Amino acid sequence: MNANATQLISCRTHGWCTGFANMLAKENVAWWRTRRWWIQSLVAIFFVDGSMLANHQLARISIERIASFNNLLIIAGVLPITAIILGQDSILGEMQSGTAAWVLSKPLRRSAFLLAKLAANGLGVLVTAVLIPGFIAYCYFDLVGGVKLPVAGFVEAMGLVYLYLLFYMTLTMMLATLFSGRGPVFGIAMSAAWGFLMGQPPTWLEAFLPWTLLISYVQDSNSTLLSLGGLLILGKQVPTLVPIITTALWCVLFTSVALGRIRRVEF
């Protein structure tokens, strides 16, 4: 066997997942062996934990209110931009640069291409935008603020944060397979992300979109509007699971549409 033959890696997968492992490995290298992961982490820490520090030390807002209300508003307003940009660049960016056409000329199915992008970016967002700033925030609440928040409730709330971001990532990836320009993709996704903040939507619509996961849902004894995530952080029961279930179903629907559409896109 010559030296060149030893460099070949046998691909034993067939069908829709052909090339998934190799593509996922490539995407993970782009995340964890470059500066991307710590730059994304610093951005999330700046907005999430930085706003927490400013609200507590400068505005003198209580730790409970910061944990359950103020910081979740920051997360709901700012972090979706990261998820939207990642979802857009992972598909549309590579299509426009020609990288996607080159990669798909290899033994790689289009479905595996999209799912590898989703898996790698999903893990990246989980670590850099949820786990790292969330861990720092919890330590701050405990060590500096002197408030011991329920661990289980805090973890569940971070799960809602991740589901919230995953909604916008999968939405953007779907839009990137439907439109060839960045304007419609970014514009529609940002309209969905900031729609609640621009005005009060109909109550029936709130139950079917992810807004109430992190934005006001019910009113507590102090006349503060809390989201489902805010209730979990304070160790309270959520009044409904409908927004959580519908958001998860939206993510599945967006991914399914993107998988169906990418098979017909010309690169």
Image (cartoon, helix red, strand yellow):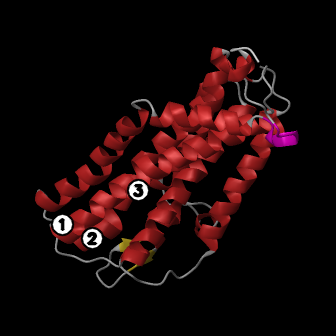
In the picture, residue 35 is in which quadrant? Answer: top left
Q: Amino acid at mark 3?
A: Leu
Element on which disc 2 rests: helix
17 inside magenta stretch: yes
Residue 254: in sight, yes or no? yes
Label drawn at residue 51: none
Rounded to the nearest whole Å, what is the CA distance between mark 3 and mark 1?
24 Å
Residue placed under numbered mark 1 in the picture: 61
Marks 3 and 1, the one that precedes in the sequence: 1
Front residue (pair 234, 111): 111
Marks 3 and 2, the one that precedes in the sequence: 2
| Percent of width and height locating residue 261 | 81, 37
| Percent of width and height locating residue 68 | 34, 69
* Residue drawn where x is 70% and y is 42% of the image: 115
- Whether tag 1 and tag 2 are in contact, CB under 8 A, the answer is yes
Q: Quarter of the image containing the N terminus?
A: top right
* Residue drawn where x is 72% and y is 55% of the image: 252
Magenta stretch, residue numbers: 12-18
Residue placed under numbered mark 3 in the picture: 131
Q: Amino acid at mark 2?
A: Arg
Q: Quarter of the image containing the C terminus?
A: top right
Give neighbour class at mark 1: few <14, some 14-19, many 20+ (Cα, 10 Å). some
Residue placed under numbered mark 2 in the picture: 65
As drawn, 66 above or below 46: below
